[in-house]
Image: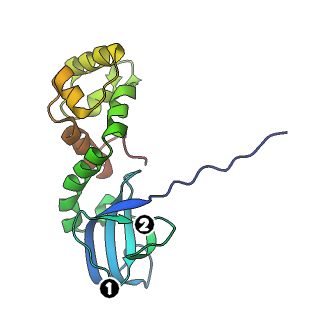
């Protein structure tokens, strides 16, 4: 007898505002109008379009609750956006907001550095992060074998990678924009 388990649905609980458009039309849902908000999810880095209450007020890069229970500003999550669906203002805000998310979730991204593996015999996933070449990859692997990294400051101090959070954020932005063949942080 086999047990069938349905895949776990992953929903964003919190998101950061990239842009908000009063009296606008949805790019995703036909005939849906109102205050449209473009956001990036905090946990899975999902680009989303939301419909907000007309009375709701937003500020760029504000963290808002979009989960299933008792939303204060949001009526509904309309769906996933592609990078190309974002407004130019949202695209401009995106890099800064990603850096904010990476800093807020530092332990998660430090864990990535501690866990990333080779993609092929000649290419390690660490090499896909800006600022990390072959030489630095070898140093990172050597250092994390001795002791896992504990923070971005620890990475910077032990291997000399300048501003790891900013480098990771650059990679995430590149993955979200669809320019990368291989994604290490963003699910397709």
Residue 97 image point, x, y percent: 24, 55
Residue 184 image point, x, y percent: 37, 38
Residue at which label 2 appears: 66
Residue at which label 1 appears: 55
The disc label shown at residue 36, or none:
none
Q: Residue at x 70, y 47 (%)?
A: 5
Q: Dot 1 surroundings within 10 Å: few (below 14), some, or many (20 or more)?
A: few
Q: Dot 2 surroundings within 10 Å: few (below 14), some, or many (20 or more)?
A: many
Q: CA distance from mark 1 to mark 2?
A: 16 Å
Name which quarter of the figure residue 107 lies in: top left
Q: Residue at x 38, y 46 (%)?
A: 186
Q: Residue at x 32, y 33 (%)?
A: 110
Q: Earlier in the sequence, mark 1 or mark 2?
A: 1
On screen, 168 above or below 61? above
Residue 174: tell me if it is visible: no
Query: Which quarter of the rendering shows the N terminus?
Result: top right
Residue 187: tell me if it is visible: yes
């Amino acid at each position: 007898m086999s047990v069938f388990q349905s895949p776990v649905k992953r929903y964003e609980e919190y998101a950061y505002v990239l842009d908000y458009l009063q009296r606008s039309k949805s790019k995703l849902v036909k005939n849906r109008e109102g205050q449209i908000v473009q956001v990036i999810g905090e946990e899975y880095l999902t680009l989303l379009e939301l419909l907000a209450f007309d009375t709701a007020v937003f500020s760029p890069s504000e963290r808002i609750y979009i989960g299933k229970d008792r939303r204060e500003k949001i009526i509904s999550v309309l769906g996933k956006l592609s990078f190309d669906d974002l407004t130019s203002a949202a695209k401009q805000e995106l890099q800064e907001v990603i850096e904010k998310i990476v800093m807020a979730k530092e332990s998660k991204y430090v864990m990535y550095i501690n866990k990333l593996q080779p993609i092929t015999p000649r290419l390690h996933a660490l090499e896909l992060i800006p600022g990390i070449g072959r030489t630095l990859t070898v140093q990172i692997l050597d250092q994390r074998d001795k002791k896992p990294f504990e923070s971005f400051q620890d990475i910077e101090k032990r291997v000399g990678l300048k501003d790891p959070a900013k480098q990771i954020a650059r990679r995430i932005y590149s993955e979200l924009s669809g320019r990368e063949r291989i994604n290490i942080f963003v699910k397709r």
